[in-house]
Amino acid sequence: MKVWILNRKKLMVIMGCVITALVGAFTLTKNNIFMAEERKLPIYCVDRSDKVVSISFDAAWGNEQTQTLLDILAEKGVKSTFFLVGFWAEKYPESVKAIADAGHDVGNHSDTHPHLPKMERDKITSQIEDCNKKIEAAGAPRPILFRPPYGDYNNSVVEVTNELNMHCIQWDVDSLDWKDPSPEEMIKRIKSKIKPGSIILMHNGAKNTPEALPKIIDAIKGEGYNIVPISEIIYKENYSMDSQGKQKCNKS
């Protein structure tokens, strides 16, 4: 059996190695925390003291229900936000113009609905700009709102959106209408999750959305909320984002 005898010099060397390892571990942890704090987030909801929420519709495939939704919104006196994919806007320009003419927000949902975090920054820019051009060509204003396809984003997606003077928008209340729940299930889900500043996600092509929409609007209003477009619920300047994607006004 070998017996190790540590003299003062060897002990100092060992202690130095231990200290170096500890410092390295601390630095790595500190850097990871710093990186997490630097993560860019889209707007999931807004810190509002007044009882306002927004209903939004993503439009990527199909157009059979769009006019029905517009008629319901008009009947209920509600303005909403529609996020349009470029190829949809190009295929249904009359619906793009109808949405804009009715006073709803026309937002950008990319040109071809890809997974943007897998793309280089110039391709992300093209996806957004090409969609903007198709929306404008259909007679709607240039969008200031962008929703990433699949809700899929990274720092580059948020940064490119901001560089184009647009706001990157997510949601904090998912109706799950794309799973074809019953209208009653959608109403219950939305009522249980909304709060002042909430952004609700729906789709223009989901099976039960036209039947559910008037009941959802009545339920939201019954809770004392006003429904406004996303462009009216977010802060355009002098704001900050918390770690959960809630946009907050920086009071002067």
Image (cartoon, rainbow, N blue to C red):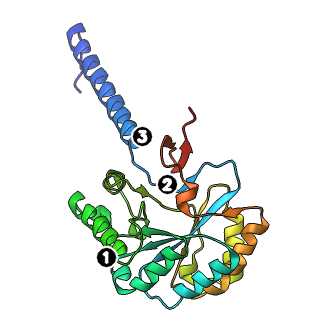
Q: Earlier in the sequence, mark 1 or mark 2?
A: 2
Q: Mark 2 falls on what kind of element? A: loop
Q: Which residue is mark 2?
A: 43
Q: Label 1 sits on what residue type?
A: Thr
- Above-or-below relation of 218 to 124: below
The foreground one among 154 and 26 is 154
Residue at the image position 64 percent from the left and 49 percent from the top: 48
N-term-proximal mark, 3 vs 1 = 3
- Amino acid type assigned to the residue bearing label 2 in the image: Ile
The answer to whether residue 215 is visible is: yes
Q: Secondary structure at mark 1?
A: loop
Q: Is residue 124 left or right of residue 89?
A: left
**Quadrant hosting residue 112:** bottom left
What is the spatial separation of the Cα atoms under label 3 and label 1, in whole angstroms? Answer: 31 Å
Q: Residues within 10 Å of mark 3 (few under 14, many from 20)?
A: few
Closest to the camera, between mark 3 and mark 2, is 2
- How far across and how far down the image is residue 122, in percent? 21, 60
Please state if 27 lies on the left or on the right of 250 as rendered: left
